[in-house]
Structures are given as structure tokens and as C-alpha cells.
Amino acid sequence: MKVTDLIHKNEKTAFSFEILPPIKGTGIEKLYKEIEALSQFDPQYINITTHRSEYVYTDLGNGIFQRSRLRRRPGTVAVAAAIQNKYNITTVPHLLCSGFSREETEYVLLDLQFLGITDLLVLRGDKAKHENKFTPEENGYSHATELQEQINQFNNGIFVDGSEMKVTSTPFSYGVACYPEKHEESPNIEQDIYWLKKKVEAGAEYAVTQLFYDNKKYFEFIEKVKAAGINIPIIPGIKPLKRASQLNMVPKTFKVDLPEALTKAILDCKNDDQVEQVGIEWCANQCRELMAHGVPSIHFYSIGAVDSIQQVAKQIY
Ligand code: FAD
């Protein structure tokens, strides 16, 4: 079933979460434990992130450094398939422009087609760590809209070299990302919404937001998005805070503001155990308000936060 059908299947607000493929060499068991900790809340689907390769430099000991490419978290497709088989739950692998050529993307699409995984989240992806601005891969793409075009062509039975598929199967359906506090590269929120609308016109069936801690920002965004004629579900993405250090790290990494009341409550904490409790309460209250406004689904960013999400979900589901 497609994500858009899954989130409207029940009266109650759907629950979904995002996991990261394990760091190379660490195995999948920890991931299974995390999924099992959250499975009691009836997740409708699970997203699997994708991480591009990075350049690493190895000191050869003679003053020379060898440059090589490393993917710290490979395995998105395999993890998606393993979870879908083991738990019989829809998985949504992320597909990126970043670090992938169009031919590599095509091979990923073929693998997913064979595995019967037909839901995707289509993204540009983060820039490489050594870059100060996003650079597309050679023969790759600069924006999610271009990747959407390739998927649409694939759905129509056309490969990137223009040749035709002999056999077609269930088409891919997909969502995209959006930013209630605007994407960091966008000059203003209106431009960002302009491009979101292009992503919808190109076939995005829903959008998932960047995490946010101030519901007002989400509600204002929804108003603007609707005024721009965008009518797809905008699924709020949420993550409970756990550590005092996140007061600086979260705004820097995700380009979002933290509300004054939340900041103050965290600064009043004596240790990170107290911060964790503040984070859980804040997140649960955010969810209650979002549910009261009738959001069809809430998506949880789970990295390093599974225990807190469990506590939040116990309160709201
Ligand atoms: P785009 O839609 O391409 O937008 C990027 C910027 O360009 C925006 O400022 C937009 O306004 C503008 N723009 C959009 N289209 C065009 C166009 N055609 N021409 C000109 N300008 C345009 N990163 C990862 O590396 N791996 C992940 O798994 C991952 N998962 C994520 C999941 C969610 C829900 C979210 C919100 C983000 C995720 N990210 C992930 C981060 C994301 O890749 C970055 O935020 C990235 O910088 C932008 O991705 P995008 O798909 O929004 O890009």
C-alpha cells in the first residue's frame, strides 16, 4: 500500500519513523531492536535514510596521504528489503541525487523493483563533507525535481539511455522533503514553496518536513503552502531533544530555531537525564497539538532518540 493510502487508512494519526542503515561492519541486530521497541505503536511505514560516500585521507606514514572514497552507512536497499520481509511493514528508502550518477540510480530502481519496494522519499541529499556547496555527481543531478523526472520516466518504462523496458511493474510512488523554516539555501520561504510546488507538479504525493520544535512555524507554513495551491499531505517530522548540547547543535545542523520556553526549560536542567524528560514532554505536547489540528501522520526522526520516542508514543497513541 502507498504511503498516502497508509496515512489515511485509519481515523487515528498515523505513526512512522526513520532509521539509518548501520555503520559499515556493525551488523543489523541493533536496528532490529530499535524497530521492535517502536513496533508496539503500529508504525504504518519505516523510512530508511541514504548516505553518500565521502573522501577519506589515510596517512601512509611518509608524509603522503592517500585519498579514497568511503560509504560509512551503505545498505539502504538491503536494509529496506530485510525489514519489509521480517516485519511485513512498508519501507520507504530514500533516493538521493547526492553522490549518485543517473546510471547508479537506475540500478537502485531496478533492485527495488525486483524486491517489490515501490515507495520512495526523493531528495537532493546533503553536500559532501569536504564541500562548501552542493556539487552534483558527474552525470548526476542538482535537484530533487530532476531525480523525480528519472523516476517518472522509469515508471513509463524508459531507461536513462532512452531504451525501453520489456516488462513493467508497479510504478514507484514518492514523497519529497520540505522546510517550515525554509531550506538553508533558499533566499526566502516563498522561493522554497515555489520549488516545493514544482516537486508536487512533478509527481510528489506528499512531503515530510524538516524537524521543528515550534508548531506555530509548521501551522504558518501550512497556510502559505495552501495559499500557493499545494494540497498534498505535509507530514510533520519531529524529534525529541535529549542533551543540553543540542541547544546549539540542532539549530546549526538543521537550520531551525528553538523556542524560548524550550531553551529556558533545558537551561534550568541540572543534567541530561532532566533534559531528556523536558524533551519528551515538549515533544508529546507538540504531537498533541498537531493531532488536535488533524495532521494525518507524525513522522519521528529516531536516531539516538528511540527511548524518548517510545515514551512520547506511550503518551499519545
Ligand atoms: P531540493 O528539493 O533540490 O531543494 C534544495 C534547494 O534548492 C532548496 O533551497 C530549494 O528551494 C531549491 N530548489 C529545489 N528545486 C530546485 C530547482 N529545480 N532549481 C533551483 N532550485 C531548486 N539527506 C541525506 O543525505 N540523506 C537522507 O536520507 C536525507 N533524508 C531527509 C529526509 C527528510 C524528511 C528531510 C527534510 C531531509 C533529508 N535529508 C537527507 C536532507 C536533505 O537532503 C537536504 O536538506 C538537502 O540539502 C535538500 O534536499 P531537498 O530534497 O529538499 O532538495
Image (spheres, rainbow, N blue to C red):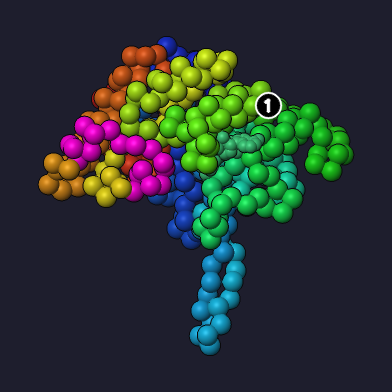
Quick one: label 1, few (<14), some, or many (20+) residues within 10 Å? some
Residue 141, compared with residue 219, is above or below; it is below
Q: Disc 1 marks which amino acid?
A: Ala
- The image position of residue 279, as x and y in percent, is 25, 36
Q: Quadrant of the C terminus?
A: top left
Looking at the rendering, the stretch of residues picked out in magenta corresponds to 249-266
Magenta part, dominant SS = helix
Number of residue marks: 1
Closer-to-camera residue (242/307) = 242
On whether residue 46 falls in the magenta region, the answer is no
Residue at image point 58% right, 15% down:
229
Residue at image point 76% right, 34% down:
154
On whether residue 264 falls in the magenta region, the answer is yes
Residue 25, compared with residue 245, is above or below; it is below
Residue 43, compared with residue 252, is above or below; it is above
Q: Is residue 144 visible?
A: no
Q: Is residue 169 left or right of residue 218?
A: right
**The image quarter in which residue 267 lies:** top left
From the image, tell me which residue sits under label 1. Answer: 202
